[in-house]
Image: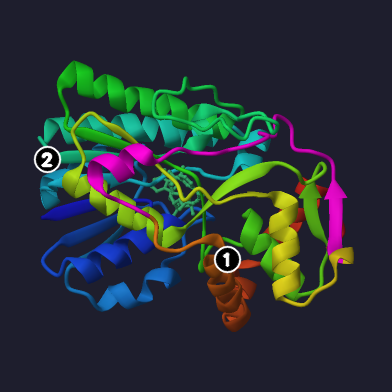
Amino acid sequence: MKLLVTGGAGFIGSYFIKYMLQKYSDYKIVNLDLLTYAGNLETLKDADTNVNYKFVKGNIVDKVFVEDLFEKEQFDVVVNFAAESHVDRSVSDPNVFVKTNIMGTQVLLDVARKYNILRYHQISTDEVYGDLPLDRPDLFFMENTPLNPSSPYSASKAAADLLVIAYQRTYNIPVTLSRCSNNYGPYHFPEKLIPLIITRAITNQAIPVYGDGLNVRDWIYVEDHCSAIDCILHNGKEGEIYNIGSHDERSNLEVVKTILKELNKPETLIAFVKNRPGHDLRYAIDSSKLHKELGWGPKCNFEEGIKKTIKWYVENESWWQSIISGEYMNYYKKQYQINI
Ligand SMILES: NC(=O)c1ccc[n+]([C@@H]2O[C@H](COP(=O)([O-])OP(=O)(O)OC[C@H]3O[C@@H](n4cnc5c(N)ncnc54)[C@H](O)[C@@H]3O)[C@@H](O)[C@H]2O)c1
């Protein structure tokens, strides 16, 4: 079996590659990644010595390049993680989100169709469903919840989802699609919420919290996301959408307080900042279809996962300090209007 994993130098894709190489010693994996600001090959250092693994730098939007790669490698399966993934960045510059997330998906689908692959799997997000009210804890996103994205990021992911579904119906491409809740874990890029809180708490810097901090997110440990994708690739039904989640809802403020407590840091580090435009109130995903039909379940709950994650950031300061370069300093300043 030969897999093309796109965006494999990113947070979740790199975990997925390591997970698959370890579990299936006879699978070959090609990682196609543009190495944008979010790509970091250091995360995959261990895989470099594996003969079943190869990295290729390239853009999924470049059809000629992608076609050449398919011709050369003859993939069986495509798993598309490649995306612009940060909501805040999509608010300041939606353009690249449309290019990579929508046009890139279309290129991959076109080429996958030409080369008759066995499975195309699209990695999507629960953010395509929009948000849920805070006072209705009984409501959850189901696979048939109407798409109602709030940010240019989630709109571009929703558009890509629709293309995937349409290509299956029009051209009969063997696709599956998964929509996952918020991931966290080691090696997460330090501008994302949990690593941002941890790294700033470690260095005693102000922790920006949007609005009143009561927005709720449903957290999943990144390895559980990977095991769910593996399960869908092997057992999922063609044309089906699967929600992935751990039922671990927390307000952003609760997450900040948990991390500060674990690191023994004062809550005075919390700095409430102007809310993000279109900030979704609550995400909560129902993944019972995946449990019932394919027997998947998460292994790590938030209490355990956040401890492992914090410990990793404490022990691997050189990893994230090398990322927090001048560019990111400027980014933080512009985004949150706080001194750093
Ligand atoms: N992080 C989450 O909580 C979460 C939750 C649900 C779904 N997702 C989805 O999972 C996928 C991966 O998310 P992540 O958090 O690992 O993102 P990430 O930003 O860490 O990684 C994205 C990777 O894609 C690469 N990339 C970007 N544009 C590219 C292009 N044009 N061609 C080739 N490679 C390109 C980047 O270099 C990077 O390595 C995304 O599709 C995202 O929408 C993420």
Q: Position of residue 326 (x, y in %)?
A: 71, 64
Amino acid identity at mark 2: Leu
Q: Where 235 sits versus 146, above or below? A: below
**Residue that appears at 38% across and 63% down:** 15
User: Which numbered disc covers residue 118?
Assistant: 2
Amino acid identity at mark 1: Glu
The answer to which of 98 and 151 lies nearer the viewer is 151
Is the C-beta of the residue carrying label 1 under 8 Å from the nearest atom of ligand 1? no
- Looking at the rendered structure, the secondary structure element under dot 2 is loop
Q: Residue furthest front?
A: 138
Magenta stretch holds residue 125: no
Q: Is residue 9 visible?
A: no
Q: Is residue 63 left or right of residue 268?
A: left
Q: Quadrant of the N terminus?
A: bottom left
Q: Quadrant of the C terminus?
A: bottom right
Q: Is residue 12 left or right of residue 333?
A: left
Residue picked out by circle 1? 303
**Residue that appears at 54% across and 39% down:** 284
Q: Quadrant of residue 242?
A: top left
Task: Check disc 2: other Cα within 10 Å, few if <14, some if 14-19, many if 20+.
Answer: some
Count of numbered labels shown in the rendering: 2
**Residue that appears at 50% across and 61% down:** 301
State which region is magenta. Answer: 269-297
Of mark 2 and mark 1, the one earlier in the sequence is: 2
The answer to which of 322 and 184 lies nearer the viewer is 184
- Looking at the rendered structure, the secondary structure element under dot 1 is helix
Magenta stretch holds residue 285: yes
Q: Position of residue 155 (x, y in %)?
A: 52, 27
